[in-house]
Amino acid sequence: MCDEFGCNSLEAEAGVALYAWAAGLMPLCIAPISEELGRRPVYLFGLALFWVFHLVNAVAQNTATVLVSRFVTGMAGSIGSGIAAGSLSDIYTPAHRGFPMLLSGFCVYFSTGLGGTAFAYVTTHLGWRWVWWIHVIYIGATVPMFIFMMPETRSVVILRRWAAKLRKQRGLEDGGRYLTHAEMEKVKLITALRTSLVRPLVFLTTEPLCVFFALWVGLAWSVMYVQLAGLPYMMRNIYGFDTEGVGLMYLTTSVGALFGIMGGLIQDRLYRRMAPTKGVEARLYAPMFGGVLFAIGCFITGFTAIPGVPWIASAIGQVVMIAAIMTIYVTAFTYISECYGIYASSAIAGQSCSRNLVGGCIGFATTSMFEGMTVRWAIVMMGGIASVLALVPFGAYIYGPKIRARSKYSRLLMHQEREAMDEERVQRQVRGMDTAGMEDYEGDANEKDIPC
């Protein structure tokens, strides 16, 4: 593409950065729309937009068209990833949510490695446009599956549609008994949008857990983008790889994902065992190990990225990095979602925004950083930062309950949970009294029926 359009490496990396920035900003406003209209129509809209602008990429005649298309595809692609956690929350309880979240993250990383390898060969033998044409064909084939096989999962939307159907069948205009709780306390969409834009920023500036986890996950995501954008530079300039050889190195992402899912399965078992005593902090065993492993992977990759050292050493370091990044990404988001309950979407939206914005900036500067610092010291520097931020999950494990006790939103959430428990306790007592009264009534009636 660069040869055909005459663009430089900075313009090529801008495509990665624009995609990441769009993916960071879009989830801020898509969450309330999915909560109001339902998950299914938002998924379908995002998929259609994704398909259209892949088609635009395939027929682009200049760099500007490609960059605009990359930005829009980043927005459209983030719709799916942005509300995927919400869909899983609709379907699974917190105790059973760990593995589905893990599987979702695994698919992202594993397919990234396979795609990088496959499309390196496509680019070499068929040309860069066929990368986009294959995407167009594949996405187009999945559209009917989404239309005919994907149900709505948002419970509030399902109940609202059910209530509307009952009102229509019975000819009711004002709702009557067929009115959902959400309809009675409905918030205007513009208000929900304003809240969804402001609250994530509030979390990122006032909630210590969100601040430190955003820094940590942002660094991990930056290294991920460095690997995606900088791997061709690294393997060509240090090891003399051609395009197909560079493509094969992307398999380190898939192999790392396999190790990452194994670590996630172990974490899921530990959570089930330790949650009764440790609470949500039982989600942090894998991140504690993964944080240390992340720094080690950066050091292995950095110190071996010099001529004379076999390429396999760098590949091992990259596998370790990706396994750690996947573990950090999945388990950290699960931990944050359980810490903030009904406010989890805002906390996660803030995390997603920060990690993609930071990752896009680092990815945009990858080649300049490698040329100015060398590949070795650029990655070693990231390993040093990772070593410091590896303390984040340990701090959360030790001080997490105290931090949440001082948090405005955590206190509010705990207050709401206590009120719900008190209300449920009162309802049980009322039901018990009603049952006892009915038994007394039936007993009196039976006594009156007995002849003297």
Image (tube, grey):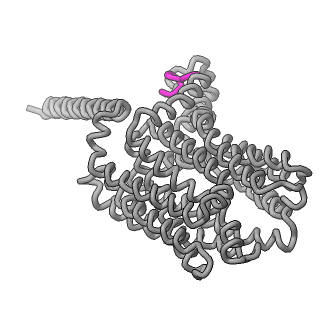
Quadrant of the drawing holding the N terminus:
bottom right
Residue 386 position (above or below residue 50) = below
Residue 343 position (above or below residue 245) = above
- When asked about the image quadrant of residue 7, the answer is bottom right
Residue 214 position (above or below residue 121) = above
The residue under the point 41% across, 32% down is 206
The residue under the point 59% across, 74% down is 306
Residue that extends furthest to the front in the rendered view of this protein? 372
- When asked about the image quadrant of residue 21, the answer is top right
Quadrant of the drawing holding the C terminus:
top left
The residue under the point 59% across, 63% down is 109
| Residue in the foreground of this view, choosing between 127 and 343 | 127
Q: Is residue 182 magenta?
A: yes
Q: Is residue 20 left or right of residue 178?
A: right
Q: Is residue 148 visible?
A: no
Q: Is residue 173 left or right of residue 2?
A: left
Q: Is residue 407 visible?
A: yes
| Residue in the foreground of this view, choosing between 314 and 259 | 314
Tell me residue 300's x, y (percent).
49, 71
Residue that extends furthest to the top in the rendered view of this protein? 174
Q: Is residue 258 left or right of residue 39?
A: left
Tell me residue 94's x, y (percent).
40, 50
Q: Is residue 249 magenta?
A: no
Give the magenta-colored segment's residue range: 181-188
The residue under the point 39% across, 42% down is 209
| Residue in the foreground of this view, choosing between 18 and 273 | 18
Tell me residue 402's x, y (percent).
26, 40
